[in-house]
């Protein structure tokens, strides 16, 4: 059985809060520091402060990555993702534990990493390739493909200090992906590029992983990208591994961790300055009861109380339901209804939107609200309400639509013909229906 390409054992990295760090300016300083490191470490341990003075960015982290595996490393800001990648890239020394990498590593951690700002794009391709351990002939063989992928032909002989951040990222990713490292480490840096280039990069990483069998460590806050690119995932919380499993499980853990207290079935608003009409409160009703938990197939209503400085007969209300990823699923409003909501102008009132049976799969959702008149929206509350859809056996067959497939299931009537007989059934999955 082959050894894993990455082995991490009880890895930890601590920082002394408020401790001044000294930057190595020359090679001589770095050599001197490495020679004196054991004594400095011993002195630091003997002079260590209280526990409050020490911050552990990582603690007791252990995992293995197989050759050819694409693993998504996810977690909230400050969870330790970037620290872990810097240790794996040999940029930062661990405080405890060890990490073994059995292959050539290419890292894309920050904009401009491995580039010299005074050199041209052409020169930096060779410089970056040399840093990765490539020979000149090997770099030259891939040179045209790198330039074509990065789309910087016109600026190839321009110093990279004049490049935009997007051009920096395009060239850096092209070099890292085309110079055939066994291990490719990519941080959130791809978020700097435009949407088209991000899609291009994800396609290249899929090709690198599936077609060429290289190992990819991918850090991103883009959960759809993690789902589509990665087979497995690693969730970091407060510097420790919270979950190691398949990508879908890890994404769901990341999206729901620490959010239980954030579910809001009722919210009160203060009037924004010089706004009229405005919302005073909003309540989310599941099956007629104020609750942030909705079983699949349950009925959802949203009730909003409002006030207006001047009497209003046609208050306009709308709502948008989104996923935790930010995907918009429903956008509803009463702006185009011809009949007035009130027989006479009012200073305050209540609007209720009954959505009926909501066809959402088990997942967390957010509701943005907006209130106004026939002309414009005066009060907007992004993500004001949130609710959780839980699994429920809607059809009584012991099956529910898997959340990995889509966000929405839809009750549709299917007709089946068998000879002279016609059978009709209601359901979202034809394979679940029996005649």
Image: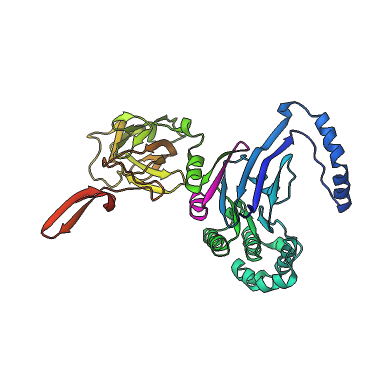
Is the residue 255 above or below the residue 122 in the image? above
Image quadrant for the N terminus?
A: bottom right
Highlighted magenta segment, given as a residue range? 222-240
Q: Position of residue 314 (x, y in %)?
A: 29, 39
Query: For the point 74% across and 33% down, which residue is it?
Result: 17
Query: For the point 28% across and 47% down, which residue is it?
Result: 336
Q: Please indicate, yes or no, whether residue 94 appears anywhere in the rendered image.
A: yes
Image quarter of residue 296: top left
Query: For the point 55% across and 61% down, which residue is it?
Result: 197
**Colour mode of the rendering:** rainbow
Left/right placement of residue 204 relative to residue 111 reads: left
Left/right placement of residue 309 relative to residue 132 reads: left
Give the tally of numbered discs. 0
Q: Nearer the viewer, residue 42 or 306?
A: 42
Q: Nearer the viewer, residue 248 or 117?
A: 248
Q: Position of residue 431 (x, y in %)?
A: 28, 52
Left/right placement of residue 123 relative to residue 385 reads: right
Q: Nearer the viewer, residue 275 or 2?
A: 2
Is 335 magenta? The answer is no
The residue at the far top in this view is 50
Is 225 magenta? The answer is yes
The residue at the far left in this view is 420
Q: Position of residue 372 (x, y in %)?
A: 36, 40
The residue at the far front in this view is 1
Image quarter of residue 310: top left
Q: Nearer the viewer, residue 382 or 359?
A: 359
Q: Please indicate, yes or no, whether residue 347 appears anywhere in the rendered image.
A: no
């Amino acid at each position: 059985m082959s050894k894993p390409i990455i082995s991490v054992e009880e890895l930890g990295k601590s920082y002394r809060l408020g401790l001044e760090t000294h930057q190595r300016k020359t090679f001589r300083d770095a050599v001197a520091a490495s020679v004196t490191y054991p004594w400095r470490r011993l002195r630091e341990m003997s002079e260590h402060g209280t526990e409050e003075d020490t911050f552990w960015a990582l603690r007791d982290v252990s995992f293995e990555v197989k050759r050819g595996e694409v693993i998504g490393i996810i977690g909230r800001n400050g969870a330790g993702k970037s620290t872990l990648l810097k240790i794996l890239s040999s940029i930062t020394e661990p405080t405890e534990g060890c990490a073994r990498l059995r292959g050539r590593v290419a890292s894309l951690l920050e904009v401009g990493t491995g580039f010299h700002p005074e050199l041209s794009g052409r020169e930096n391709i060779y410089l970056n390739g040399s840093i990765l351990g490539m020979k000149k002939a090997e770099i030259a063989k891939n040179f045209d493909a790198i330039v074509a992928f990065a789309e910087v032909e016109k600026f190839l002989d321009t110093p990279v200090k004049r490049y935009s951040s997007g051009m920096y990222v395009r060239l850096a990713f092209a070099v890292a992906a085309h110079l055939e490292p066994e291990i490719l480490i990519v941080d959130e840096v791809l978020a700097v590029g435009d949407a088209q280039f991000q899609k291009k990069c994800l396609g290249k990483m899929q090709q690198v992983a599936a077609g060429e069998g290289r190992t990819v460590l991918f850090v991103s806050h883009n959960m759809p990208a993690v789902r589509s690119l990665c087979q497995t995932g690693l969730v970091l919380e407060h510097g420790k591994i919270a979950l190691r499993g398949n990508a879908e499980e890890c994404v769901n853990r990341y999206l729901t961790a620490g959010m239980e207290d954030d579910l809001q079935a009722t919210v009160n608003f203060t009037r924004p300055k010089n706004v009229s009409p405005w919302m005073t409160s909003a309540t989310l009703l599941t099956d007629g009861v104020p609750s942030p938990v909705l079983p699949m197939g349950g009925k959802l209503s949203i009730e909003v109380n409002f006030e207006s400085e001047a009497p209003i007969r046609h208050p306009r209300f709308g709502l948008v339901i989104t996923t935790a990823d930010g995907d918009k699923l429903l956008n509803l409003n009463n702006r185009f209804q011809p009949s007035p909501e009130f027989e006479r102008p009012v200073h305050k009132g209540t609007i209720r939107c009954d959505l009926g049976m909501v066809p959402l799969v088990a997942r967390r959702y957010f509701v943005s609200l907006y209130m106004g008149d026939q002309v414009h929206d005066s009060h907007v509350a992004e993500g004001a309400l949130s609710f959780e859809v839980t699994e429920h056996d809607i059809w009584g067959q012991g099956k529910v639509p898997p959340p990995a497939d889509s966000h929405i299931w839809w009750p549709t009537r299917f007709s089946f013909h068998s000879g002279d007989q016609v059978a009709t059934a209601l359901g979202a999955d034809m394979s679940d229906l029996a005649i």
